[in-house]
Image (tube, helix red, strand yellow):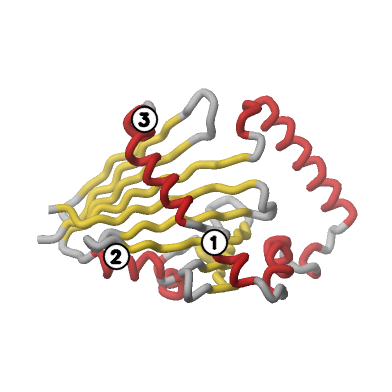
Amino acid sequence: MNTITTTTMTMSVLNIYGYGYGVVAVVVFLILLLWQRHRFFFASSRSSPSTSLLLFDSINSNSNSRSRTSNFVTDADLKFLMEILDEKLGSDKWEDVLDKRNHHLSYSVKCCRPKNGPLKYLSKTVFNDISSEMLRNFYMDNDYRKQWDKTLVEHKQLQADKSDGTEVGHTIKKFPLLKPREYVLAWKLWEGSDKTFYCFMKFSMSDASLFSIRFTYLAICS
Protein backbone atom coordinates (compact mmCIF):
# COMPACT_ATOMS: atom_id res chain seq x y z
CA MET A 1 0.00 0.00 0.00
CA ASN A 2 1.41 3.39 -1.02
CA THR A 3 1.18 6.29 1.38
CA ILE A 4 1.66 9.81 0.01
CA THR A 5 2.55 12.70 2.27
CA THR A 6 2.06 16.33 1.27
CA THR A 7 3.53 19.14 3.30
CA THR A 8 2.52 22.75 2.67
CA MET A 9 4.27 25.75 4.16
CA THR A 10 2.95 29.30 3.85
CA MET A 11 4.49 32.52 5.08
CA SER A 12 4.62 36.21 4.18
CA VAL A 13 7.84 37.82 3.06
CA LEU A 14 8.05 41.62 3.21
CA ASN A 15 10.75 43.86 1.82
CA ILE A 16 10.64 45.66 5.21
CA TYR A 17 11.08 42.34 7.01
CA GLY A 18 13.92 43.48 9.25
CA TYR A 19 12.16 46.55 10.67
CA GLY A 20 9.58 44.79 12.84
CA TYR A 21 5.81 44.82 13.07
CA GLY A 22 5.56 48.51 14.03
CA VAL A 23 6.71 49.58 10.59
CA VAL A 24 4.49 46.92 9.03
CA ALA A 25 1.46 48.38 10.82
CA VAL A 26 2.29 51.87 9.57
CA VAL A 27 2.73 50.62 6.01
CA VAL A 28 -0.56 48.72 6.16
CA PHE A 29 -2.32 51.85 7.44
CA LEU A 30 -0.88 53.94 4.60
CA ILE A 31 -1.90 51.32 2.05
CA LEU A 32 -5.46 51.31 3.40
CA LEU A 33 -5.53 55.11 3.34
CA LEU A 34 -4.37 55.23 -0.27
CA TRP A 35 -6.83 52.49 -1.19
CA GLN A 36 -9.75 54.45 0.29
CA ARG A 37 -8.62 57.55 -1.57
CA HIS A 38 -8.42 55.57 -4.78
CA ARG A 39 -11.95 54.27 -4.28
CA PHE A 40 -13.22 57.81 -3.70
CA PHE A 41 -11.85 59.12 -7.00
CA PHE A 42 -12.44 55.95 -9.02
CA ALA A 43 -15.74 54.58 -7.79
CA SER A 44 -16.43 52.81 -11.08
CA SER A 45 -13.64 50.27 -10.62
CA ARG A 46 -15.50 47.58 -12.57
CA SER A 47 -14.88 49.39 -15.82
CA SER A 48 -11.13 49.46 -15.29
CA PRO A 49 -8.74 46.54 -15.91
CA SER A 50 -7.67 44.35 -13.00
CA THR A 51 -4.70 45.68 -11.06
CA SER A 52 -3.22 42.20 -10.98
CA LEU A 53 -3.52 41.84 -14.73
CA LEU A 54 -1.96 45.26 -15.28
CA LEU A 55 0.96 44.09 -13.20
CA PHE A 56 1.85 41.56 -15.87
CA ASP A 57 0.71 43.39 -19.02
CA SER A 58 4.20 44.73 -19.60
CA ILE A 59 5.63 41.24 -19.15
CA ASN A 60 3.29 39.69 -21.68
CA SER A 61 4.10 42.38 -24.25
CA ASN A 62 7.86 42.19 -23.71
CA SER A 63 9.89 40.24 -26.27
CA ASN A 64 12.08 38.93 -23.46
CA SER A 65 9.12 37.66 -21.46
CA ARG A 66 10.37 34.06 -21.45
CA SER A 67 13.60 34.94 -19.70
CA ARG A 68 11.74 37.17 -17.23
CA THR A 69 9.21 34.45 -16.49
CA SER A 70 11.95 31.94 -15.72
CA ASN A 71 13.35 34.39 -13.16
CA PHE A 72 10.14 34.46 -11.11
CA VAL A 73 10.86 31.06 -9.53
CA THR A 74 14.39 29.68 -9.63
CA ASP A 75 16.48 26.79 -8.32
CA ALA A 76 17.63 29.15 -5.56
CA ASP A 77 14.04 29.21 -4.28
CA LEU A 78 14.03 25.41 -4.09
CA LYS A 79 17.34 25.47 -2.20
CA PHE A 80 15.89 28.03 0.21
CA LEU A 81 12.90 25.82 0.92
CA MET A 82 15.02 22.72 1.43
CA GLU A 83 17.07 24.62 3.99
CA ILE A 84 13.86 25.59 5.79
CA LEU A 85 12.73 21.97 5.95
CA ASP A 86 16.12 20.65 7.06
CA GLU A 87 16.96 23.30 9.64
CA LYS A 88 14.35 25.83 10.67
CA LEU A 89 11.42 23.46 11.05
CA GLY A 90 13.27 21.68 13.83
CA SER A 91 14.37 24.82 15.67
CA ASP A 92 11.14 26.85 15.51
CA LYS A 93 8.38 26.40 18.06
CA TRP A 94 5.24 25.12 16.33
CA GLU A 95 1.76 25.17 17.87
CA ASP A 96 -0.85 22.56 16.93
CA VAL A 97 -3.86 24.12 15.20
CA LEU A 98 -5.76 21.18 13.72
CA ASP A 99 -5.48 17.38 13.57
CA LYS A 100 -8.09 15.23 11.82
CA ARG A 101 -7.92 11.75 10.32
CA ASN A 102 -9.97 8.85 8.97
CA HIS A 103 -9.29 5.57 7.14
CA HIS A 104 -8.37 7.33 3.90
CA LEU A 105 -6.27 10.29 5.00
CA SER A 106 -5.01 12.43 7.86
CA TYR A 107 -4.62 16.20 7.99
CA SER A 108 -2.76 18.35 10.51
CA VAL A 109 -1.92 22.06 10.72
CA LYS A 110 0.72 23.82 12.82
CA CYS A 111 1.48 27.50 13.33
CA CYS A 112 4.73 29.29 14.16
CA ARG A 113 4.96 32.88 15.45
CA PRO A 114 8.61 34.01 15.26
CA LYS A 115 9.55 37.09 17.27
CA ASN A 116 11.35 38.75 14.36
CA GLY A 117 9.62 37.20 11.40
CA PRO A 118 6.31 36.66 9.63
CA LEU A 119 3.60 34.25 10.72
CA LYS A 120 4.11 30.75 9.27
CA TYR A 121 1.73 27.85 8.75
CA LEU A 122 2.66 24.23 8.11
CA SER A 123 0.08 21.66 7.01
CA LYS A 124 0.62 17.96 6.42
CA THR A 125 -1.71 15.55 4.62
CA VAL A 126 -1.19 11.79 4.36
CA PHE A 127 -3.13 9.95 1.63
CA ASN A 128 -3.53 6.15 1.47
CA ASP A 129 -3.61 4.05 -1.72
CA ILE A 130 -2.64 6.76 -4.20
CA SER A 131 0.44 7.41 -6.34
CA SER A 132 2.52 10.57 -6.19
CA GLU A 133 1.94 11.16 -9.92
CA MET A 134 -1.83 11.05 -9.46
CA LEU A 135 -1.69 13.46 -6.56
CA ARG A 136 0.61 15.78 -8.50
CA ASN A 137 -1.82 15.87 -11.42
CA PHE A 138 -4.71 16.52 -9.03
CA TYR A 139 -3.02 19.52 -7.41
CA MET A 140 -1.55 21.06 -10.58
CA ASP A 141 -4.60 20.74 -12.87
CA ASN A 142 -6.14 24.21 -12.53
CA ASP A 143 -8.98 23.44 -14.94
CA TYR A 144 -10.07 20.43 -12.90
CA ARG A 145 -9.65 22.46 -9.70
CA LYS A 146 -12.67 24.51 -10.73
CA GLN A 147 -14.84 21.42 -10.19
CA TRP A 148 -13.85 20.72 -6.58
CA ASP A 149 -12.40 23.95 -5.18
CA LYS A 150 -15.47 25.97 -4.17
CA THR A 151 -13.34 29.04 -3.40
CA LEU A 152 -12.02 29.27 -6.98
CA VAL A 153 -14.05 31.68 -9.10
CA GLU A 154 -11.76 31.99 -12.11
CA HIS A 155 -8.28 30.97 -13.23
CA LYS A 156 -6.42 32.02 -16.35
CA GLN A 157 -2.91 31.08 -17.40
CA LEU A 158 -0.90 34.14 -18.41
CA GLN A 159 2.39 32.53 -19.34
CA ALA A 160 4.14 29.17 -19.46
CA ASP A 161 7.83 28.61 -20.09
CA LYS A 162 8.00 25.04 -21.41
CA SER A 163 11.78 24.93 -21.37
CA ASP A 164 12.01 26.00 -17.73
CA GLY A 165 8.69 24.76 -16.35
CA THR A 166 7.73 28.11 -14.80
CA GLU A 167 4.08 29.14 -15.12
CA VAL A 168 2.26 32.39 -14.37
CA GLY A 169 -1.48 32.62 -13.81
CA HIS A 170 -4.25 34.96 -12.68
CA THR A 171 -6.71 33.62 -10.09
CA ILE A 172 -9.86 34.99 -8.47
CA LYS A 173 -10.89 33.35 -5.19
CA LYS A 174 -14.00 33.90 -3.06
CA PHE A 175 -13.93 33.05 0.62
CA PRO A 176 -17.03 33.04 2.88
CA LEU A 177 -18.06 36.51 4.13
CA LEU A 178 -15.35 38.15 2.01
CA LYS A 179 -15.31 39.81 -1.38
CA PRO A 180 -13.56 38.00 -4.26
CA ARG A 181 -9.81 38.53 -4.27
CA GLU A 182 -7.46 38.53 -7.23
CA TYR A 183 -4.02 36.95 -7.22
CA VAL A 184 -1.16 36.74 -9.68
CA LEU A 185 0.76 33.52 -9.17
CA ALA A 186 4.11 32.20 -10.37
CA TRP A 187 5.05 28.58 -9.70
CA LYS A 188 7.46 25.85 -10.71
CA LEU A 189 7.46 22.09 -10.17
CA TRP A 190 10.53 19.91 -9.62
CA GLU A 191 10.61 16.09 -9.79
CA GLY A 192 13.17 14.01 -7.89
CA SER A 193 14.60 10.66 -8.95
CA ASP A 194 12.47 8.93 -6.29
CA LYS A 195 9.20 10.38 -7.63
CA THR A 196 9.22 13.11 -5.02
CA PHE A 197 7.73 16.40 -6.20
CA TYR A 198 8.50 19.91 -5.01
CA CYS A 199 6.36 22.90 -5.91
CA PHE A 200 7.36 26.49 -5.14
CA MET A 201 4.71 29.17 -5.58
CA LYS A 202 4.81 32.95 -5.22
CA PHE A 203 1.68 35.06 -5.28
CA SER A 204 0.76 38.72 -5.03
CA MET A 205 -2.62 40.41 -4.68
CA SER A 206 -1.65 43.64 -6.45
CA ASP A 207 1.90 44.63 -5.55
CA ALA A 208 4.91 42.65 -6.68
CA SER A 209 6.92 43.97 -3.73
CA LEU A 210 4.73 42.02 -1.26
CA PHE A 211 4.89 38.26 -1.73
CA SER A 212 3.69 35.21 0.12
CA ILE A 213 5.54 31.96 -0.48
CA ARG A 214 3.80 28.61 -0.57
CA PHE A 215 5.75 25.42 -0.59
CA THR A 216 4.32 21.98 -1.29
CA TYR A 217 6.26 18.77 -0.72
CA LEU A 218 5.08 15.39 -2.01
CA ALA A 219 6.77 12.10 -1.07
CA ILE A 220 6.05 8.36 -1.08
CA CYS A 221 6.48 6.92 2.41
CA SER A 222 6.78 3.19 3.08
Examine the image and state in which quarter residue 80 appears: top left
The picture places residue 188, in percent across and down from the top left corner, at: 46, 62
Mark 2 or 3 closer to N-term?
Answer: 3
In this orientation, which residue lies closer to the viewer: 175 or 130?
130
Q: In what element is the residue under mark 3? A: strand
Q: Pointer 1: what residue? A: 186
The picture places residue 156, in percent across and down from the top left corner, at: 57, 73
Residue 135 bears which disc, if any? 2
User: From the viewer's perspective, is 180 left or right of 162?
Assistant: right
User: From the viewer's perspective, is 71 left or right of 190?
Assistant: right
Measured in 3D between alpha carbons, the distance from the residue under mark 2 to the one under mark 3, in whole angstroms, is 27 Å
In this orientation, which residue lies closer to the viewer: 144 or 15?
15
Mark 3 or 1 closer to N-term?
Answer: 3
User: From the viewer's perspective, is 71 left or right of 134?
Assistant: right
- Which class describes the residues within 10 Å of circle 3: few (<14), some (14-19), or many (20+)? some
Amino acid type, callout 1: Ala
Measured in 3D between alpha carbons, the distance from the residue under mark 2 to the one under mark 1, in whole angstroms, is 20 Å
Q: Pointer 3: what residue? A: 94
Examine the image and state in which quarter residue 190 appears: bottom left
